[in-house]
Amino acid sequence: MKIALILMAGSLLAAELPKAETLLDRYVEVTGGAAAYQQLRTQQVVSDIEFAGQNIKGTTTVVSIYPDRSLTTMELSGLGKMLSGVWDGIVWESSAIQGQRLAQGAERSFMRRLNDIRGTADWRKYYSTVTTESEETIDNQACYRILYQPRDGGKPEYAWLAKDSGLLVKSRMTMITPMGEIPMEITVSDYKPAGKLLLPHASTQQVGPQKILSRIREVRTNLELNADSLKPPAEVQPLIAKQKPE
């Protein structure tokens, strides 16, 4: 009898959790609304970053053109410039340290999803199922934990949305890299207006053992950009030419 009551109580508690779809749609609304995301054509984000405990600082500039072009420039003290981006579905990297490469398979899908500037509103495009798993407290905020299952069969992802504000507090995912799978956890805060949207301007990324602190310095939206300005550098072009079309 006691076991039956415990199971019943557990079922009732689970039933009281709001649907993940409702929570995610609310997040879209509180950060600007679906219409504002759909009007987003281009975006430029400049951030200051620091690798905690390593005395390495620098900046990142991410320029994006919807739907499938972006260029990320990372400049770090003592390490020089590293470039990466998405070009019509091709995901590439170029740096003096690691050379030139194209991402394939799960890594490519993950990076395309991460670089979609309308991805917050278009979450149904990338995830087959979303589930509210539990209530948890993150940084003294009561949150709902949501499980996402990517449509491409990639690793499950998680997000914690604040119960009161509906805003994202933390996310967790698995990075696919040439060195293997690396867990990544991102805590965000300091939401501020950016054009018609509301974006977190501070984040702490825990990538494996490395902690990276980031603060947005500037966000500009719907700039008039030349799409060719995001074209991969000349060193990457031979790799693109060899890649068979999908």
Image (cartoon, helix red, strand yellow):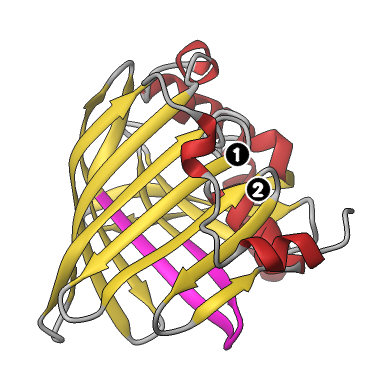
At 58% from the left edge and 78% from the top edge, which residue is drawn?
177
Counting other residues with Cα less than 10 Å from the Cα at mark 2, is it few (<14), some (14-19), or many (20 or more)?
some
At 55% from the left edge and 71% from the top edge, which residue is drawn?
175
Closer to the camera in the image, 240 or 174: 240
Residue identified by numbered label 1:
20
State the CA–CA distance, disc 2 to disc 1. Answer: 5 Å
Question: Where is residue 159 drawn, in percent x and y?
Answer: 48, 52
Would you place residue 244 above or below residue 217 in this image? below
Q: Do the residues under discs 2 and 1 have CB atoms within 8 angstroms?
A: yes
Quadrant of the rendering where the N terminus is positioned: bottom right
Q: Magenta includes 181? A: yes
The numbered mark, 2 or 1, whose residue comes first in the sequence reads: 1
Magenta stretch, residue numbers: 172-188
The circle drawn on residue 131 is 2
Res. 66 image quadrant: top right
Kind of residue sitting beneath label 2: Thr
Q: Magenta includes 101? A: no
Relative side of 233 to 54, left or right: right
Res. 75 image quadrant: bottom left
Relative side of 246 to 243, left or right: right
Element marked by disc 2: strand
Whether residue 132 is visible here, answered yes or no, is no
